Image: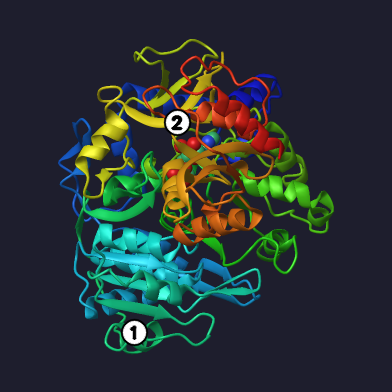
Amino acid sequence: MTHQIAIESVLREKRLFEPDPAFARRANVPGQAAYRRLRKEAETDYQRYWARLAKEHVDWFTPWKKVLDWKPPFAKWFVGAKTNISYNCLDRHLEGPNAWRRNKAAIIWEGEPGDQRVLTFGDLHREVCKCANVLKGLGVKKGDRVAIYMPMVPELAVAMLACTRIGAVHSIIFGGFSADSIRDRVNDAKAKLVITADGGWRRGQIIPLKDTIDEALQGADSVKHVLVVQRTGQSILMKNGRDQWWHDQMKTASSDCPPAKLDAEHPLFILYTSGTTGKPKGILHTTGGYLVHTTVTAKYIFDLKEEDTYWCTADIGWVTGHSYVIYGILSNGVTSVMYEGAPNHPDVDRFWEIVDKYNVTILYTAPTAIRTFMKWGDKHVRKHSLASLRLLGTVGEPINPEAWIWYHRTLGKKRCPIVDTWWQTETGGILITPLPGCVTTTPGSATLPFPGIFADILDEQGKPVGTNQGGYLVITRPWPGMLRGIYGDRKRYKEQYWSKYKGIYLTGDGARKDKNGYFWIMGRVDDVMNVAGHRLSTMEIESALVSHPEVVEAAVVGRPDEIKGTAIVGFVTLEQGNEPSDALRQTLRQHVAKEIGAIARPDEIRFTESLPKTRSGKIMRRLLRDIAAGRGSVGDTTTLEDYSILAKLREAEEA
Ligand code: WTA
């Protein structure tokens, strides 16, 4: 579907971009020979390779006894070792040879209204220690879960690092999720504490986060306290005994809090993501391996240097924000820019204003954002110099060659290498990517696995496919940042990722390899859509639709969309006695937004008397996708139960 389109367009892509020798000379992996040596080292003994990197890039309180304990599908990395992530992101930049970093900016933050804050590594350390003591005071202990529902403000970084300092497990919930979605996540993780803010700014409006939390916590009994950051200042309800103001608690908290010496496999965070069922999966990551993976990949892929000002535009509520706004960047002692709001507030050139103002050197964003900037027009970009930029990255979905070229020319002025990085919430960090200065790039391909990562493309039977043939993208050996499970659901973990091929990780993406061995990601092969770089489960949106009293049955599919990559189309059958109408269309779209969050709001609702099904009763999504995309030929329909439905759906399309 969308995959086929991707293949067609990328097959024509022949443009090659050789690494610039001047960039290569200064790069952390300095050129092709160095890159080949790294690959060779990793291929000879991948465990030794990761162990070397772990020793060089991360500080440990106690060394490991064994690099990897692999009992498929359960992996333990750096067995017996002890470390602490907040120590690696903060304390180690305040002492020893790097002590001068105490007064270096760790976070440069800009709020949407234009307010600014800079936290040095010293400041951040102090705030994190205080916050860790606040958490302790509120009864949070090692291993307890803390749910975080916050805008992009520095306190979010403080809160997550404070959790890691004492070994509490954070579960960050993206600020766009609805009360119901929050409740499910809080209950699944049995969170003891929620950290939130009164609100956050988005396109000049207040997002009322605390109100949403109040609604969400009706029916979430595990939560003992809510810690509330004052951001927007509007009046909110503070529930006596349960709710505490952040600033009150911080005022009296001690700034002395030694980092807990945590086992390498101590749980670090849970992050919920969409799967192929209606129930979100709590992806579980642990401490040591994740830290090694994010630190090393950030250093090599973004070519991080002491003097860089790095900006990843992702919200911390997604995995990209966890790994590459906070952990992988701060552990390298590099300055990370954080922006609270929308890219078009007050104007569509806000991002470029930020780049110029702080002299951002590395920019990491999503293809959907790039396409939006293209649509807004080059003149908004040209108003700004952007001379500080030296490297660009993308993540979240396949980038179409047109967007890649625009990114290269208009943003990067043909001077900046582009790293198209493929990875997932489950993988913890980047797995497939070029290294800048080393790998020749071609628009639309994420190129090669990071040295130490082993990827392949298999057919149904588990045989590697031939050149340019599509198949299932898999990872054949364990890697340090891999998920350790789905929280509270061993069975689903095994089934989802490890049951198709024994001992091999199934990514859920389709891909092909070209004659140079470059990987071309074709998109999801399961019932998960990628909408504007975010994973959404068709099932989850369907159950939201069906929960509306007037709906009997619903099927949700993606349709190719110029900006979002995929737009959401819902086919809906109504209860007897209800008439299709535009008003109902709007109601249903709103209903989904309320149930899940605005990101899941269908772009289009189509009413139909019934849905096309196979004889066994499975909805034929392939057909619906073709109809949604307005494609003429709908392919093979021999398994379709009721042919007349097709014609009717088409009529609905015309209406
Ligand atoms: C897609 C985001 C093509 C893919 C880090 C994957 C990509 C899903 C790329 C994970 C890329 C991510 N090229 N597709 N560079 N990066 N994807 O869990 O389908 O939000 O499985 O993690 O996004 O989305 P998630």
In this picture, residue 628 sits left or right of residue 472: right
For label 1, the SS is strand
Point out the image quarter for the C terminus.
top right
Q: Position of residue 116 (x, y in %)?
A: 60, 75
Q: State the residue in front, 491 or 50.
A: 491
Q: Is residue 274 above or below residue 335?
A: above
Q: Is residue 253 left or right of residue 179?
A: left
**Residue that appears at 32% across and 69% down:** 162
Q: Residue at 36%, 49% (x, y): give it.
A: 280
Q: Please say whether residue 452 is visible from this viewpoint.
A: no
Numbered mark located on residue 143 in the image: none
Contact, CB < 8 Å: mark 2 with mark 1? no
- Residue 358 figure quarter: bottom right
Q: Say whether mark 2 is within 8 Å of ligand 1.
A: no
As displayed, is residue 627 above or below residue 374?
A: above
Look at label 1 and name its amino acid: Gln
Position of 539 relative to 648 (above/below): below
The alpha-carbon separation of the residues under discs 2 and 1 comes to 49 Å
Question: Residue 416: horizontal and vertical position, in percent?
Answer: 68, 42
| Left or right position of 22 against 257 | right
Nearer the observer, 512 or 638:
638
Q: Determine if residue 577 is in view.
A: yes
Q: What residue is disc 2 on? A: 619
Inspect the image, locate mark 2, and give the three-letter code of the amino acid beneath it.
Ile
Could you say where residue 560 lies in the image, as x and y percent from the top left?
63, 36
The image shows residue 144 at horizontal and vertical percentages of 21, 64
Q: Which mark is residue 244?
A: 1
Q: Nearer the viewer, mark 2 or mark 1?
A: 2
**Considering only vertical position in the picture, is 458 above or below 257?**
above
